[in-house]
């Protein structure tokens, strides 16, 4: 971690940008809209809402967008289970922890945009920053000064960060870390454990040529013998071990120790994928929480509260190798998303955001556990860690039915991992979540018995 530098301070301070125009007034709250603080929201849709209209959008999407969504986890089957025909797939408005569907349903969201929003939707600080950046002109043929300011601030809060390169998606940031490690070591082989996005090196989907991933050996989470064997096989060609440090649970210290030891012994680079854990477990991710520094790390998602930006960060001696290879994306340093990161950093400066995420996640898990116990439902339990938790079901059919019943009660839960806590999940919301889960589970039990 480097010494703090003041935003925009010191020599060479850029001239003040022109005063941006006033941001547009936010739209008037309409009856039935959720307040961003959720105070007056009782978990049940208000006013008229049209479930059929929601399903029409689902059909329209299926016609024009292969799979119905550009993000795999937002496909209807991914949201609710294979061959389900219920459930909204699109939204028209999001505020705090509430989303409004085209049919007018307002739902409490426990998925928080796949963990990319930890403050809340349309957060005032983040939105103000982004609007100002847009109004001031957020791209040019030169890089924006905020790229340096935000990079400096990330070096302050992320333990292993001495230098930073920005990209747009989590997948790009991890791919960049792997490329930097390969450029630095002059080697090819990578040992990998976790999900790293959709790009060729990390994925064995249809359409990926086997050669694209032939130098990557996959190992299971927390398996010391497997990582030792994979590194032994890679031998002197081992460039990196890349690890997603939290997969449904915290890692065993011994596993991480083994990864560090193997990297040190073989002259390879240890990379953490902190795309989900960054600005969630702690601002600096798992490495800060677990006091375990990798050489490089990838951040994304909650770093910008839902705006499209990611970062590869790490030790300067290794990051320097980025200059020897080619990592470049036209809009990597556009200033709207950088302004969103600055807004998130402001939040972390003035509040214990991650402590709140842990506490709120704990309360969400407790609410679900109490609802399960009270309903007498069997074959269902709550798992994960508080900032990233999920419900485990005995069958996919029962899980789908629970999701459907919870939606009727005004709550969108994630199918499988993970539900994510956000600052916007306030006390009333937690009560509403417990009520919705209880009602859904009681009905599910009744249906099972009848
Ligand atoms: C751990 C991890 N790494 C990488 C990614 C890929 O990020 P993106 O979808 O922004 O490319 C994800 C996405 O879920 C992730 O969870």
Image: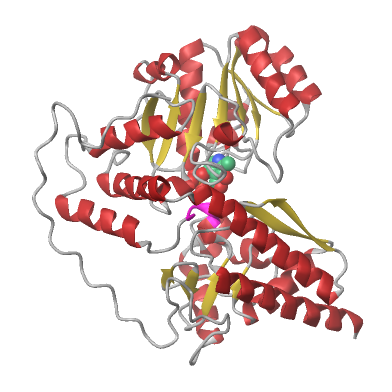
Query: Would you place residue 387 above or below residue 75 in this image?
Result: above
State the residue at coordinates (74%, 76%): 438
The picture places residue 134, in percent across and down from the top left corner, at 21, 54
Horizontal side, residue 147 vs residue 446: left or right: left
In this view, the residue in front, 438 or 332, is: 438
> In the rendered image, which quarter is residue 22 located in?
bottom left
The picture places residue 11, in percent across and down from the top left corner, at 14, 26
Split into 4 quadrants, where in the image is the C terminus? bottom right
Residue 53: in magenta span: no
State the residue at coordinates (20%, 64%): 23
Residue 117: in magenta span: yes
The picture places residue 363, in percent across and down from the top left corner, at 66, 61
Ligand 1: give its quadrant: top right
Colouring of the image: secondary structure
State the residue at coordinates (62%, 43%): 206
> In the rendered image, which quarter is residue 412 located in?
bottom right
Q: Can residue 308 be seen in this view?
A: no
Horizontal side, residue 20 vs residue 257: left or right: left
Q: What stretch is highlighted in magenta?
A: 114-118
Q: Is the magenta stretch mostly helix, strand or loop?
A: loop
The picture places residue 195, in percent across and down from the top left corner, at 62, 40
Query: Would you place residue 268 above or below residue 378 in this image?
Result: above
Q: Can residue 318 be seen in this view?
A: yes
């Amino acid at each position: 971690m480097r010494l703090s530098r003041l935003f925009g301070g010191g020599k060479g301070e850029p001239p003040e940008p022109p005063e941006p125009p006033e941001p547009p007034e936010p739209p008037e709250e309409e009856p039935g809209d959720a307040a961003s603080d959720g105070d007056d929201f009782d978990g049940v849709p208000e006013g008229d809402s049209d479930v059929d209209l929601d399903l029409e959008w689902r059909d329209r999407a299926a016609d024009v967008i292969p799979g119905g969504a550009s993000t795999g986890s937002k496909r209807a089957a991914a949201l609710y289970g294979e061959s389900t025909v219920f459930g909204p797939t699109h939204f028209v408005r999001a505020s705090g922890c509430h989303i409004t569907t085209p049919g007018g349903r307002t739902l409490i969201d426990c998925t928080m945009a796949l963990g990319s929003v930890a403050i809340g939707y349309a957060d005032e600080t983040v939105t103000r920053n982004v609007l100002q950046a847009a109004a001031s002109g957020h791209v040019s043929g030169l890089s924006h000064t905020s790229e340096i300011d935000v990079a400096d601030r990330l070096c302050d809060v992320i333990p292993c960060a001495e230098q930073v390169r920005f990209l747009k998606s989590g997948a790009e940031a991890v791919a960049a870390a792997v490329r930097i490690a390969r450029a630095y070591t002059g080697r090819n082989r990578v040992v990998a454990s976790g999900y790293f996005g959709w790009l060729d090196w990390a994925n064995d989907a249809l359409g990926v040529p086997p050669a694209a991933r032939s130098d990557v050996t996959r190992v299971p989470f927390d398996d010391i013998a497997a990582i030792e064997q994979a590194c032994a096989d890679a031998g002197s060609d081992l460039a990196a071990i890349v690890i997603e440090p939290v997969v449904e649970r915290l890692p065993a210290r011994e596993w991480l120790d083994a990864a560090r030891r193997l990297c040190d012994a073989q002259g390879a680079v240890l990379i953490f994928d902190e795309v989900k854990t960054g600005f969630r477990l702690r601002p600096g991710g798992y490495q800060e929480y677990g006091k375990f520094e990798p050489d490089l790390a990838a951040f994304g998602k909650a770093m910008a509260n839902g705006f499209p930006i990611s970062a590869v960060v790490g030790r300067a001696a290794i990051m320097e190798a980025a200059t020897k290879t080619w990592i470049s994306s036209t809009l990597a340093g556009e200033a709207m998303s950088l302004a969103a990161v600055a807004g998130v950093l402001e939040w972390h400066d003035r509040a214990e955001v991650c402590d709140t995420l842990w506490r709120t996640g704990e309360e969400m898990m407790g609410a679900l556990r109490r609802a399960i116990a009270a309903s007498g439902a069997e074959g269902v339990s709550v798992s994960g860690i508080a900032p990233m938790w999920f419900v485990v079901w005995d069958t996919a059919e029962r899980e789908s039915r629970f999701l459907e019943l919870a939606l009727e009660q005004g709550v969108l839960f994630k199918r499988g991992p993970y539900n994510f806590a956000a600052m916007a999940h306030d006390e009333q919301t937690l009560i509403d979540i417990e009520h919705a889960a209880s009602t859904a589970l009681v009905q599910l039990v009744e249906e099972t018995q009848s």
